[in-house]
Amino acid sequence: MTISLEKFGLREVINASGRMTILGVSKVSESVLAAQKFGGQHFFEMSELSIQTGKYLANLLHVDDVQIVASASAGIAQSVAAVIGRGSLFHTYHPYTKRITKREIILPKGHNVDYGTAVEIMVAEGGGQVVEAGYANMCTPEHIEMMITDETAAVLYIKSHHTVQKSMLTVQEAAEAAHRHQLPLIVDAAAEEDLCKYSEMGADLVIYSGAKAIEGPSAGMVIGKKELIEWVRLQSKGIGRAMKIGKDNILGFTQAVEDYLAHGPEAGSAMLERLTPFVAALNEIDHLKAQAVQDSAGRAIYRASVRVSGVKSAKEVIRQLKEKSPAIYTREYQANNGIIEFDIRSLDQEEMDKIVRRLKEIMEED
């Protein structure tokens, strides 16, 4: 059977927005595809596959244990359920029971964001109740601690470019505040590139997306303390059943992590080197002013930031970039300020050339 865009009536897509779920996140390597093929063509004792791949990854990451899950969002829901149920089989089968009242999950207010869905929806999926700490533009360890009650199950920290960055406590400070009250800290680090530092900072459970920085298939992983990971794994008998991951993606993801640890992400210096001619070409187009900028969350990711002037607004340019084939998707977070960002991590030179040509056409049209 031949697979093609035409077969399904789909347009070609150029992804200049980054590792975004709405575009399929990332591309996988040949070694990951080979691992997926092996998984797809064999049978396994699935509970054992879960345990053994987790053990293998834990050894690579120097943590107690790892549980592979369907996605980072599934990781949030199952981690919340885990710290509420604390290994109770009754809870697994009755996750929303009123017999368990310790359900409050403390979250900095500036971390209660929409990343494609709301953080609080995933917390609720796991049976938790979000309690916001601090303010939209500030949260300190003291703000976290003043919200702790006898009903608190855990503290949740979202490490993401979507969240408020200024005046926020660090992961280490959140861990220290949680541990002073014998509470676990869950860190959602879905798109983060460092797979070790948040555990080293004291987080008890850390959640990563499989398809973002790691460039694996649709998957995620929760890493952390042995007992807590066992509680997460237990959720496969409960809410995790609706979020189960297939054998092919378990093995593909495991290979992706191994490859990622061996080779790492594209270096910031290499990204800047590829960006330089792209930015120069964009600056030759009337009414566009481009520059290289670093990721707002401080990651070693550099993008082309393009200010649009003249008759057309940034929002109109974004609309026109999407309307033809190839449909060109950009980062739209600053469109209201007249700025479009281009993330080149998933772009090759031919795609960057297509973007420049299409922008020139758009800006020259009456």
Image (spheres, grey):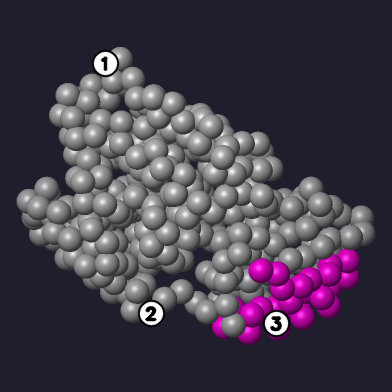
Q: Residues within 10 Å of mark 1 (few under 14, many from 20)?
A: few
Q: Residue furthest top?
A: 98
What is the secondary structure assignment of the residue under circle 3?
A: helix
Mark 3, residue position: 276
Magenta range: 270-294
Which residue occupies 39% across, 24% down?
151
SS for tag 1? loop
The x, y position of residue 266, in whole percent, is 50, 77
Query: Which residue has dot 1 on it?
Result: 99
Apparent side of residue 253 relative to residue 181 in the rendered image (left or right): left
Up/down of 195 relative to 240, above or below:
below
Can you tell which of label 1 and label 2 is closer to the viewer?
Answer: 1
Q: Is residue 141 left or right of residue 263?
A: right
Camera-side residue of 349 and 242: 242
Above-or-below relation of 188 to 181:
below
- Residue drawn 39% across the image and 55% down it: 202
Quarter of the image for the N terminus: give it.
Answer: bottom left
Which quadrant of the figure has residue 309?
Answer: bottom right
> Residue 308: x and y, percent?
84, 61
Distance (Cα) linking label 1 and label 2: 48 Å
State whether residue 250 is above or below residue 85. Answer: below
Residue 91 in sight: yes
Q: Is residue 293 magenta?
A: yes
